[in-house]
Structures are given as structure tokens and as C-alpha cells.
Amino acid sequence: MSMIKNYLEQLRIQRWDDHRYYHHSRINQSLHFVSALSFLFAYVWLFIDPVVSALVGWLVSMTSRQAGHFFFEPHTYDHINQATHEYKEEIKVGYNLQRKVVLMAIWALSPLVLVVDPTLFGIFTPWQSATDFMRQVAKIWLVVGGGGLLFRTVHLFFIRDVETGLVWMTKILTDPFHDLMLYRGAPLALMRGELMDPGLHLNPEHTLGFIDEPVLEEQHA
């Protein structure tokens, strides 16, 4: 039980640090709400048609999610947490902006392999139509998504420890459920003209009944 309790504690800390460091913008939060809804749709469709799941996951969920981080989240000095953008990028457990650029570039360029080799080294039957092409691209994107998740998880095993990697993987897989609750009020706040979250000094999980006190713990590289 103590191992499970510690695992959940580490998961809570990673979620809290991720929110307070990287989700100041109400636009970013709103885009995460949209991303969470579409990811949940993709989760369901994974058991119905994985191809549709991959297309929704990458074209809607990931693009909306990362657009919030790249274009709307402040990259200046964080006065709330008293941290520079460079420091936050350095201690980021998961994919910081530089790593995300690499991941998104791989995703965006991956369809080119089907142009160069329509069989993908004999794995696919050469595509004959646009529909065939998109379905094969979606299968590649499934591998890119799963590979990106597993790569960083195993990477964390070596640069941090096994628990940190497994906790991060759990966080990523459950983020759509958590973000749906956490950012459900962001679109309305944005419509009221609130561009930045004024309550980042408060742990949002406190208001959701998950914990008793705010946690202000930092991640270390």
C-alpha cells in the first residue's frame, strides 16, 4: 500500500507542477479542454477503428494542445513561481518545447516516407487512393505516438529513475480525464476576458477534492 501511495503522490506532484508551470494562459487551458474532449473520443475509437483514433488524436488533440503551449503560453519570467522560462524548460519531466519541436517534426514529415516508398519497406500494400494514403499515414502516426511515449518513458528510467518514468507515462495517458475536470471552466473565463489564470498559486486539485493542502514542490533534473 505504501508503494501505491507513493506512486499516487508522485503522480499528483507531476500534475501540479505541470499545471502551475505551463498552463497560465486561459487560451492554452481552453485548448487543453478541447484536446481532452477529442482525446477521449480517440480513446474510444481506438477500440473501434484505430485509424480514425490516430487521425483525431494527432490532427485535433495534439495540434490544439501544442498550439496552446507554443503560441499562447507566456515564455517570459514566471513571477508566480519565481522561475525563468529556461529553468522550467530544463526541469521539465516530459517533453519540453525543444523536444516537442522534434516530435512534431517527426509527425509532420512522416507521411513523406509513403511518397518515397509506398510499401514502407514491404509493410504496406502500395496506396491507390487518397483514402488509402490517409489510412496508412494514420497507422504510422499511431507508431509515432506510441513510440514517443515509450521513448521518453524509458529515457526517464536512465536519467531519473524507473518510478519517475512510469509516473510520467501514467500522467500522459490519464491527462485527458484530468484536464477535462481541471480546465472545464477555462472557456467561460476566457469569454469573460480573463486571459491569464489568477489562481495559479492555488493547487486546483484542492478545489476538486483530491488533496487537503496545496503542494509547492519542484522537479529536479
Image: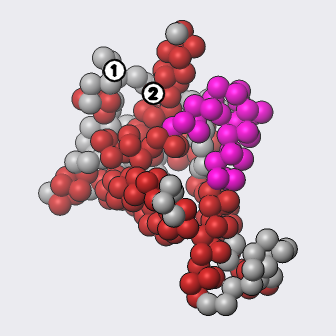
The local secondary structure at tag 1 comes to: loop
Residue furthest top in the image: 2
Name the residue: 65% across, 75% down: 136
Name the residue: 46% across, 53% down: 43
As displayed, is residue 216 above or below residue 145? Answer: above
* Number of on-image labels: 2
Tell me, for residue 12, which label it has, or none: 2
Q: How is the image coloured?
A: secondary structure
Answer few, some or many: residues within 10 Å of disc 2's Cα (few below 14, many 20 plus, some between 14 and 19).
Answer: some
Residue 185: image location, x then y, percent: 22, 48
Image quadrant where one finds the C terminus: top right
User: In the rendered structure, are the residues bearing label 2 and label 1 in contact, judged by CB atoms less than 8 Å apart?
Assistant: yes
Residue furthest front in the image: 48
Query: In the rendered structure, which amino acid carries the disc numbered 1?
Result: Ile
Tell me, for residue 44, which label it has, or none: none
Residue 192: image location, x then y, percent: 14, 57
Q: CA distance from mark 2 to mark 1?
A: 9 Å
Which segment is the magenta one? Answer: 146-171
Residue 7 in magenta stretch? no
Q: Is residue 130 left or right of residue 127?
A: left
Name the residue: 50% across, 55% down: 47
Residue on which disc 1 sits: 211
Answer few, some or many: residues within 10 Å of disc 1's Cα (few below 14, many 20 plus, some between 14 and 19).
Answer: some
